[in-house]
Amino acid sequence: MSILDGLFFGSKVPFDEVDMNCPEYYRAGDKVSECRARLIEHHPDLTQLMEEYETAQMEQNELGRFHEFSVGVRVGTQPMLEMMKEL
């Protein structure tokens, strides 16, 4: 496992202990849940398709988040590398 993988997935730093105190995030999640419930209520035959869609979307989001994280780590490392150069 690379150091980026370890940092991202929490084996190097305890990211699972980070407090997600962001009311907007939870409101957005509630809205998604409400929309999903309404869709299933009106189209119960779409339940399985919705589950497959949500799984695929979660996978895509996770890959996107990892890419953004790795870019951020690389950008954050650039100043450190520059500081190590001789003046």
Image: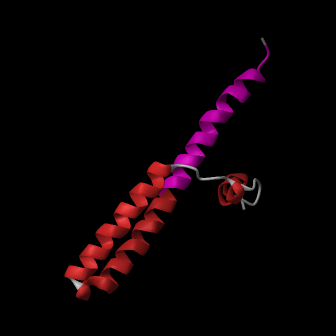
Give the percent coordinates (x, y) of residue 25.
46, 53
In the image, farthest residue toward the left: 42
Left or right, 81 with respect to 72, comes to: right
Q: Is residue 41 magenta?
A: no
Give the percent coordinates (x, y) of residue 45.
24, 88
**Occupied quadrant, residue 55:** bottom left
* Magenta stretch, residue numbers: 64-86
Give the percent coordinates (x, y) of residue 31.
35, 61
Left or right, 14 with respect to 51, comes to: right
Q: Quadrant of the C terminus?
A: top right
Q: Is residue 59 above or below residue 77?
A: below
Q: Residue at x 37, y 69 (%)?
A: 33
**Occupied quadrant, residue 75:** top right
Compare residues 35 and 46 and report the one nearer the observer.
35
Q: Residue at x 58, y 40 (%)?
A: 72
Q: Is residue 81 above or below residue 46?
A: above
Q: Residue at x 58, y 50 (%)?
A: 21
Left or right, 77 with respect to 24, comes to: right
Q: Is residue 85 magenta?
A: yes
Q: How many marks?
A: 0
Left or right, 82 with respect to 70, comes to: right
Q: Residue at x 72, y 62 (%)?
A: 1
Q: Main secondary structure of the magenta part?
A: helix
Give the percent coordinates (x, y) of residue 38.
26, 74
